Image (cartoon, rainbow, N blue to C red):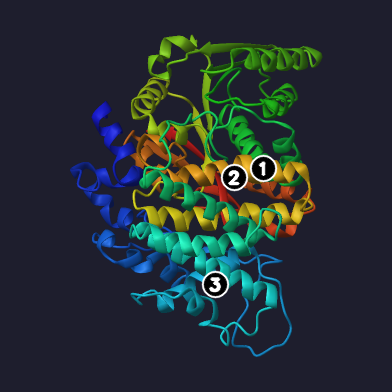
Amino acid sequence: MEDSTDIQNFCTNYGFYQEYAANPQVQETNKQQEEMNVYAVTPQVQTGSHVDKTPFLSLAPFELLRNNPSRWKNTEGDKVRNLNEGTNAYQKLSAMQIMRLAGERFIQFSSNKFININNLLHLYGSALSNLSPEDNQDVELAQILLAAAEKVSDQQYDRARKMLMQCQLLSSNTGNPAQRAVFYFAQALEERIDRETGRLIPKIHSVETDGSICIASRFDASHLAFHQEVPFTQVVHFTGIQAILESVATKSKVHLIDFLIRTGVQWASLIQAAAERKDNPIEHMKITVVESVNKERVEETGKSLESFAKSLNFPFSFKIVFLPDRNQLTEDHFDVKPDEGVVIYAAFFLRAMICEPNCLETAMRVIRRLQPELMVVSEVEANLNSPMFVNRFIDSLFYYSAFFDCLEDVMKRDDQHRMTLESVTYGGGIRNIVGSEGKERVCKSVNLDVWRSFFKRFGMEEVKLSETCLYQANLIIEQFACRNSCSADVNGRSLTVSWKGTPIYFTSAWKFH
């Protein structure tokens, strides 16, 4: 059904989406696909085929913020304020609100051909009078950043540099969330200018080590500290575990294939739950892990899981398929038995394959031949792969602002773990997404709607997550101090976990027709 040319086109042309638009096999879904164009911040708005010929791409993502605010579900601690209410009470805005308000204000003067920095700072002084002084300054700062991005897009580098100098003066990597976000995005714009003007030698980045939303093989103390404070990954993993258990409820032998195990801590919970199953007890569970970088780390994970299973007197085995070249993967590597119920687990794995289309095609072909009972997919719920620089900049600004805002709520400003996450993890991702192009840009993510279109071409259908999955997701969130800022929301048949209404990750389940 698919060939490598199809997959390569799907991955490399127009942000992992548009190449299939004219394909006869998906003509019947064109209307839906138009509504989920990856150029927009949300799937409800199409920016148009001539978007690259208009100043700042007609600012469609900003127009969307004004016309369709329901994209961001307002939760406690992030109420959208009415600037015309005339109240003197200040309510601190989140970093996401700062960026959205700056975008809305920027729309109002974006048609001006000549933007003076002083005008940018003071044009809306009266309109923003109901904001606190700090929020007012942050909105103005974000406006300068957006204007700089526009100038970079127009290759007006000298003017962009002047605006970025203002950003550097007014932002800080130790300031509030909005100031920290501007600090790292300004750095990324500077790096992009240096690349495009030949001041920086291009280099090919590693998918395994660059950025927070790229696949990172190293989960150090900073990541662990973050995950102990925020339920994002726990919701994703444990929702997936529940879906897996339900899919193999009648199977006495279970074979789970994990394409990116990372720490593997979630599988201890799966083993424990499976060991406690009284109806149709599991005779044997096998986990096979596909690894291409650090075999020794995965071996240690396997030993820990085997030891844990032994302590429960649970029949369990662990196998590693070590393939430096994932394109060499075949179904024979998994030694699947006829009486095994096969489940595929792909958490934060597929997005790394967007820039390796041959490997993605190979993985999907092998998965289809394995005919699993279920495939669980968890990924970033954001479109950060638009070929149009400004759209990618805006989308990533909104997405990362949620993380800076989150860290403000759960960690102190001088916390070393926070500084590491922001400078190395998030800063690295921002620099790659904003500052790089071509083969240098390896941090790529697309949202659930785009994956839906992709999986449909392989004859896959989305499986509705059960009420138990949703209940457990909310139960997990309730265990955290930041529970009022997090939410687990139904997205079609899947689940999205959000921070103050901004989608962060999604979990979905799939099966073949």
Tell me where residue 114 sits by quadrant. Answer: bottom left
The residue at which mark 3 appears reads as: 101
Question: Which comes before the other along the chain, label 3 or label 2?
Answer: 3
Residue 421 is marked as 1
Q: Is label 2 in a helix, a strand or a loop?
A: helix
Q: From the viewer's side, name the closer residue of 315 and 387.
A: 387
Confirm or deny contact between disc 1 and disc 3 (CB under 8 A): no
**Which quadrant of the figure contains the C terminus?**
top left
Q: Is residue 463 left or right of residue 12?
A: right
Q: Is residue 310 left or right of residue 489?
A: right
Q: Is residue 436 above or below residue 205?
A: below
Q: Is residue 51 above or below residue 207?
A: below
Tell me where residue 32 sits by quadrant. Answer: bottom left
Q: Position of residue 318 (x, y in %)?
A: 63, 12
Q: Position of residue 459 (x, y in %)?
A: 34, 34
Question: Which comes before the other along the chain, label 1 or label 3?
Answer: 3
Confirm or deny contact between disc 3 and disc 2 (CB under 8 A): no
Q: Position of residue 3 (x, y in %)?
A: 25, 27
Specify whether residue 512 is in view. no
| Residue type, numbered disc 1 | Leu
Residue 426 is marked as 2
Residue drawn at point x = 56 percent, y = 72 percent:
140
Q: Residue furthest bottom?
A: 86
Residue drawn at point x = 72 percent, y = 56 percent:
408
Confirm or deny contact between disc 2 and disc 1 (CB under 8 A): yes
Report the Cα–Cα distance between label 1 and label 3: 26 Å
Specify whether residue 109 is in view. yes
